[in-house]
Image: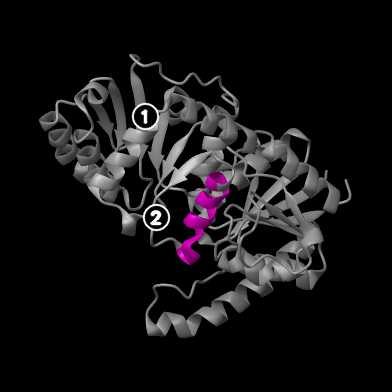
């Protein structure tokens, strides 16, 4: 049985596409080994049917002086262990998804002479991916790469970013813009970081809309737990109906129902918006590494699929005026939804698996 090694960091942005690829390759009869740091011992449930191998790894970010001194030695140990494990496994290909746990694995793969590919979720190549990109046989990109792309662009393959099956099942769901008297369904979420800014700004902006527009709003907002009561009071004071929660386990369905989404522009969010095909006001997280969320948002804005405003430029009045102009133009909403759908790649996992099979000689 052909073995494929996947190596990913511990964040959802790295793990989600790795999980989707693992399931697609398992369906094709491949043996999957996930190689990561010590946290990998907890990954079994996230990669059913795959084997887990751990290697030492380290990051240079947010560490003490002593641990920074130790980091190069931990990475070196990870490379040595990685080479030994890869020689034992003899994989047909190794795929890196970024994050510091993938660094020693991808270096080990190159030293051992195995075919490799990396997958980049954002429009800016991540720090680990840009280190190993020069030696990778292929660079699978979710979007056109705005910065740090490899010099040899012939190695870039636009596969898209794999999404959850629940999202894939809603690919291209029909979009009907609200009529002049219809309910307008708004979905607002800020991701795991920076949601507090949206909790402050969006309720106040919506409260300032004209009464006839406010009366039509049906609001769903994901907030941090510590913000929910404050947000609830803001909406209640404005006479607005809103469903609030710190987590929605049916987010794909809520995306599908929304007439307009207000959100950050992380890779997974952008991919889900385009697969389902929904218009959005994007407010990039201002502290994202290398400002990659702005680059992600630019892809949709340039295609006429979204509007973008930077948090530093945002005021309640500016956001309110922006939302009023958008919500009063249903034809524009429909055009943006269609443009978003045109960017979607619901078959991204299959495209990525095809690439892996190709470099692995299958």
Q: Position of residue 347 (x, y in %)?
A: 69, 34
Quadrant of the image containing the C terminus: top right
Residue bearing the label numbered 1? 327
Left or right: 108 as drawn, with respect to 175:
right
SS assignment for the magenta stretch, majority = helix
Q: Distance of mark 1 from mark 2, alpha carbons? A: 23 Å
Mark linked to residue 234: none
What kind of element bears circle 1?
helix
Quadrant of the image containing the N terminus: top right
Q: Residue at x 45, y 81 (%)?
A: 68
What kind of element bears circle 2?
loop
Q: Is residue 192 above or below residue 27?
A: below
Q: Position of residue 50 (x, y in %)?
A: 65, 44
Q: Is residue 32 visible in the rendered structure shown here?
A: yes
The answer to which of marks 1 and 2 sits earlier in the sequence is: 2
* Residue closer to the observer: 318 or 65: 318
Q: Residue at x 32, y 59 (%)?
A: 312
Highlighted magenta segment, given as a residue range = 289-301
Q: Position of residue 117 (x, y in %)?
A: 74, 57
Q: Is residue 164 visible in the rendered structure shown here?
A: no
**For mark 2, does the 10 Å Cα neighbourhood hold few (<14), some (14 to 19), or many (20 or more) residues?**
many
Q: Is residue 125 above or below residue 142?
A: below
Mark linked to residue 285: 2
């Amino acid at each position: 049985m052909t073995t494929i090694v996947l190596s990913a960091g511990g964040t959802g942005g790295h793990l989600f596409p790795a999980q989707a690829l693992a399931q697609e390759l398992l369906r094709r009869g491949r043996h999957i080994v996930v190689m990561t740091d010590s946290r990998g011992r907890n990954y079994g449930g996230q990669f059913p049917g795959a084997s887990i191998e751990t290697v030492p790894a380290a990051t240079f970010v947010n560490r003490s002086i002593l641990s920074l001194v130790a980091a190069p030695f931990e990475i070196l140990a990870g490379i040595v262990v990685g080479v030994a494990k890869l020689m034992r496994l003899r994989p047909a290909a190794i795929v890196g998804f970024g994050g510091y746990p993938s660094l020693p694995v991808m270096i080990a793969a190159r030293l051992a002479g195995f075919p490799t590919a990396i997958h980049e979720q954002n429009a800016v190549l991540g720090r680990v991916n840009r280190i190993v990109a020069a030696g990778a046989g292929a660079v699978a990109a979710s979007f056109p790469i705005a910065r740090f792309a490899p010099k040899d662009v012939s190695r870039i393959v636009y596969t898209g970013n794999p999404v959850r099956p629940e999202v894939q099942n809603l690919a291209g769901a029909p979009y009907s813009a609200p009529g002049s008297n219809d309910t307008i369904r708004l979905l607002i979420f800020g991701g795991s970081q920076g949601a507090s800014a949206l909790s402050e700004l969006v309720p106040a902006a919506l409260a300032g809309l004209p009464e006839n527009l406010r009366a039509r709003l049906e609001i769903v907002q994901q907030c941090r737990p510590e913000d929910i009561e404050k947000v609830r009071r803001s909406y209640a004071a404005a006479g607005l109906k809103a469903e609030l929660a710190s987590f929605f386990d049916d987010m794909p369905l809520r995306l599908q129902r929304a007439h307009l989404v207000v959100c950050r522009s992380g890779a997974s969010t952008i991919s889900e918006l385009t697969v389902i095909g929904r218009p959005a006001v994007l407010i990039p997280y201002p502290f994202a590494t290398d400002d990659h969320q702005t680059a992600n948002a630019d892809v949709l804005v340039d295609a006429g699929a979204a509007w973008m405003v930077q948090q530093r430029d945002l005021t309640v009045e500016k956001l309110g005026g922006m939302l009023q102009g958008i919500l009063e133009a249903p034809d524009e909403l429909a055009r943006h939804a269609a443009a978003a759908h045109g960017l979607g790649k619901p078959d991204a996992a299959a495209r990525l698996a095809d690439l892996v099979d190709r470099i692995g000689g299958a």
